[in-house]
Amino acid sequence: MSNTASPQAEHFNQLQAIVLAMPMARTLGLSFKHMAPGKTELEIPVQDAFTFRPGQLQATAIFAIADFAAVSAAGTLLPAGWVNATIDANIKIVAPASGALLRARGRVINASKLLTVCAADVYSVNSSGEETLCATLLGTARNIDTAPRTQ
């Protein structure tokens, strides 16, 4: 077996490093559980600091994990040297976000050169591992070429 990582694995590792370097991701305790082209799965623990009543998360934390999951899924399809950023998102909270952790599954709806439409479903996960859908997000990511422009 070779010691060199595939270009896809390197890309996914770079994407995770970029996301996990963000202060909000670190504050939330965000972790990546799965990545595939056009898909991600992320988790955050339910922390008292982000609740508005005991054990129930505020919308801010729900939106954050949904956004990270959706836009990270979009990032899995970017070519080398490109990054992305959220330019629009709409979330619908459909149930309380409570339990041991939140799990968000991001996916790409439509990818193009400059814009990617992406989505995420967020689940409350109890201590037994049972999931309950608590929110869904539809977003748009702007794809940005970071290579220096030559004139």
Image: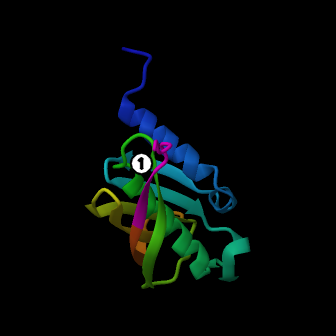
Q: Which residue is located at x 69 percent, y 60 percent?
A: 27
Is 144 one of the magenta-colored residues?
Answer: yes
Region in magenta:
141-151
Q: Which residue is located at x 64 percent, y 49 percent?
A: 21
- Depth check: give the residue in front, 142 or 58: 142
Instruction: Determine if residue 124 is in view.
Output: no
- Depth check: give the residue in front, 131 or 73: 73
Residue 9 in the image, given as x and y percentages of width and height: 41, 34
Q: Which residue has dot 1 on it?
A: 34
Name of the residue lying farthest toward the right: 49
Residue 105 in the image, given as x and y percentages of width and height: 39, 62
Relative vertical location of residue 115 with respect to residue 149 in this rendering, above or below: below
Disc 1 marks which amino acid? His
Q: Say which element carries label 1.
A: strand
Q: Which residue is located at x 39 percent, y 56 percent?
A: 73
Counting the numbered discs, the total is 1
Q: Which quadrant holds the N terminus?
A: top left
Q: 125 left or right of 110?
A: right
Q: Which residue is located at x 35 percent, y 60 percent?
A: 114
